[in-house]
Image (spheres, grey):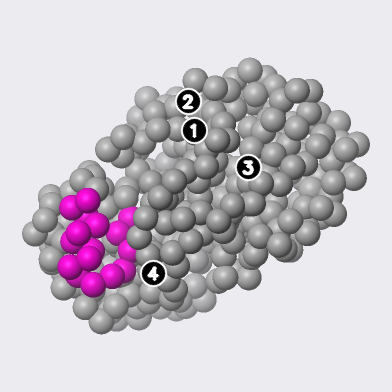
Amino acid sequence: MNLIFHPYELQLKHTFTISRESHNTQPSLVVELQADGISGYGEATSNPYYNITIENMRLQLEKIKPKLLEMPVSAPEQFWQTFEPHLKDNYFALCALDMAYNDWYARKKQQKLFELWKLNTANNPLTNYTIGIDSIEKMIAKLREKPWPIYKIKLGTKNDLDIIHALRKETDAVFRVDANCGWTAAQTIENAKELKKLGVEFIEQPLRADDWEGAKEVYQHSVLPIIADESCIVEADIDKCLGFFHGVNVKLTKCGGLTPGKRMLEKARKLGMKTMVGCMTESSVGISAIAQLLPLLDYVDMDGALLLKEDIAKGVDIIHGQVFYSNIAGTGVTLF
């Protein structure tokens, strides 16, 4: 099995700001696995918060090339188990590899990946569209530019409630808010009361990832559901989040790909938790992979490709929040 790298510098439509950082571009690595005349594609973006760069992903993946060449065709679960020990220090790289293999494997079986998993897409959730932190005027302009049924609003500023009040005057769409670890427990409990009145559906990761005492307090007293993000990275975190969060946002890059991500979602559902998958500003390569998991989700944030000036691939189409699958097998991706 041949491994090919496609690095990109994705250009964003707008400066994207959350509580801890801003950026205008998003470096991304697309991995292509090639065998038997079939190519499968996976993607992972760089992330300074987790010390992930395109270069360190590439270096880690270069090391497993010899093993890939001799690897027999196996089920994706076995493939992931084989390479996880070699990439345990860089789950973003493992994600790109696992995503590419799942795509390749389903294409070889001549099925869409969700069909291979025997999932029913009839009741897929709509994806939100994210409004990054900016001046209130610019956030209003971004919202007006993209009429949408559900918005995720990034917060963690000194005027968070003012932002939601201003945006609510513009639309009756569903709001979700994501504070990206920017609040205290007391702020969260208090803010939730007003946010609920303003039509907010849930709050995502309001506290620092390691503030479990605060998370417990918020879980017990918040009038809105709380969804874990930075507190839920890998499979073991699902059990840790039970009783501290009402649901989990699984990021494929953080947990190591589609294979463990699917296991995490299935486990969370069994425990009675709400399930969500979020993106990391990937192109349609990563977004089309997320789309395969939609039947397992209550909520989804897969607007990454919509935030780009230009996409690098063709995959799923997203129209007013609804996802439409490609006719191509696997995850349905074609690189431009």
* Tag 4: amino acid: Ile
Quick one: label 4, few (<14), some, or many (20+) residues within 10 Å? many
132 is within the stretch colored magenta: yes
**Cα gap from disc 4 to disc 3, whole angstroms:** 25 Å
Q: Residue at x 84, y 41 (%)?
A: 68
* Tag 2: amino acid: Ser
Name the disc covering residue 110, or none: none
* Tag 1: amino acid: Gly
Tags 1 and 2 in contact by the CB under 8 Å rule?
Answer: yes
Label 2: element kind: loop
For residue 237, what is the image quadrant?
Answer: bottom right
* Tag 3: amino acid: Gly
**Mark 2 vs mark 3: which is more N-terminal?**
3
Q: Residue at x 21, y 78 (%)?
A: 159
Q: Which residues, given as a range, are shown in magenta? A: 130-145
**Mark 1 vs mark 2: which is more N-terminal?**
1
Q: Which residue is mark 4?
A: 18
**Mark 4 vs mark 1: which is more N-terminal?**
4
Q: Quick check: 266 above or below 245?
A: above
Name the disc covering residue 326, or none: 2
Label 3: element kind: strand
Give left or right: position of 270 versus 90: left
Residue 162 place in picture, x, y as percent: 16, 73
Residue 202 place in picture, x, y as percent: 29, 58
**Cα gap from disc 1 to disc 2, whole angstroms:** 6 Å
Residue 313 visible to an observer of this rendering:
yes
Tags 4 and 3 in contact by the CB under 8 Å rule?
Answer: no
Secondary structure mainly formed by the magenta segment:
helix
**Cα gap from disc 4 to disc 1, whole angstroms:** 27 Å
